[in-house]
Image: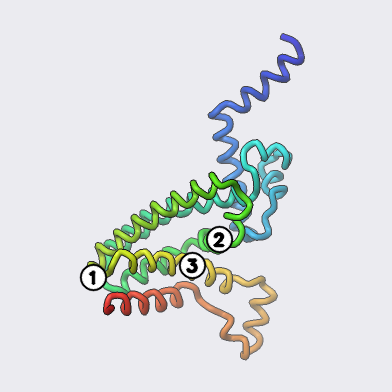
């Protein structure tokens, strides 16, 4: 075998379906770890490439942009959260119980909340149409499954109201997570100045109160 044939055959083996899937998983794992450690906004494609031990240009064989990587992680997070939430919701029988299920499961998933905030702002805007389609199909399936579970727990709730609940919970969780996790120097500023105490929020109880109020009104409508 010639040197040229060897150089050609190597990349072909590396691009086998199994090898490609393994490399994609490694990239996603690295991005997930970096996002949890630093926050998604600060993680660059170069950071992810360095963590995996690849050149940035080589990563383009697997993902077109950093946004595509994190959008994939957002879809994975929806799939992980949905059955956990649905189980909690189906064991609830009151508006407060359902609200508590949403608030506690989201508060326990800070990385998911970060992704939820970033998805409409950034992650859906620098990717292919097909990447957005795949993500929206995943989140749409989760939305339908969660709405069904909510209506099982609260039969008086309409399907549109149940879907609005999911939208409100995920949107607010993304926003509240950003507010409740400021940089250390900003957090210290809020704690040191009594006039800024309103800027310090606790995600779970605030989200629970708002969702409970929404459900109480929706059930009474």
Q: CA distance from mark 1 to mark 2?
A: 31 Å
Residue under the image location 53 percent in, 78 percent down: 201
> What kind of element bears circle 3?
helix
Do the residues bearing badges 2 and 3 touch, measured as CB atoms within 8 Å? no
Which mark identifies residue 171?
Answer: 3
Q: Give the side of residue 146 with respect to residue 181, left or right.
A: left
Residue under the image location 67 percent in, 40 percent down: 59
Which mark identifies residue 156?
Answer: 1
Q: Give the side of residue 144 with respect to residue 50, left or right.
A: left
Which mark identifies residue 120?
Answer: 2
Residue under the image location 49 percent in, 73 percent down: 203
Say whether disc 2 or disc 3 marks the residue closer to the N-terminus.
Answer: 2
Q: CA distance from mark 1 to mark 3?
A: 24 Å
> What kind of element bears circle 1?
loop
Q: Quarter-wise, where is residue 13 in the image?
A: top right
Determine crowd level at label 1: few under 14, some 14-19, many 20+ residues with C-alpha closer than 10 A.
few
Residue under the image location 63 percent in, 72 percent down: 182
Say whether disc 1 or disc 2 marks the residue closer to the N-terminus.
Answer: 2
Establish if 82 lies above or below 97: above
Q: Position of residue 127 (x, y in %)?
A: 61, 49
Establish if 73 lies above or below 201: above
Q: Quarter-wise, where is residue 118 in the image?
A: bottom right
Say whether disc 1 or disc 3 marks the residue closer to the N-terminus.
Answer: 1
Q: CA distance from mark 2 to mark 3?
A: 10 Å
């Amino acid at each position: 075998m010639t040197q040229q044939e060897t150089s050609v055959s190597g990349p072909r083996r590396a691009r086998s379906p199994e090898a490609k899937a393994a490399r994609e998983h490694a990239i996603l794992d690295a991005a997930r770890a970096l996002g949890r450690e630093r926050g998604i906004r600060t993680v660059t494609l170069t950071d992810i490439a360095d963590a995996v031990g690849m050149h940035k240009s080589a990563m383009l064989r697997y993902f077109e942009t950093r946004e595509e990587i994190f959008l994939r992680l957002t879809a994975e997070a929806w799939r992980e959260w949905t059955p956990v939430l649905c189980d909690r919701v189906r064991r609830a029988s009151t508006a407060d119980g359902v609200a508590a299920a949403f608030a506690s499961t989201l508060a326990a998933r800070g990385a998911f909340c970060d992704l939820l905030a970033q998805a409409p702002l950034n992650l859906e805007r620098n990717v292919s149409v097909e990447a957005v389609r795949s993500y929206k199909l995943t989140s749409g399936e989760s939305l339908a499954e969660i709405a069904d579970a909510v209506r099982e727990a609260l039969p008086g709730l309409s399907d549109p109201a149940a879907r609005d609940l999911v939208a409100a919970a995920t949107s607010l969780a993304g926003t509240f997570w950003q507010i409740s996790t400021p940089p250390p120097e900003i957090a210290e500023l809020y704690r040191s100045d009594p006039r800024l105490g309103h800027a310090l929020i606790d995600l779970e109880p605030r989200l629970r109160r708002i969702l409970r109020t929404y459900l109480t009104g929706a059930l009474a409508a």
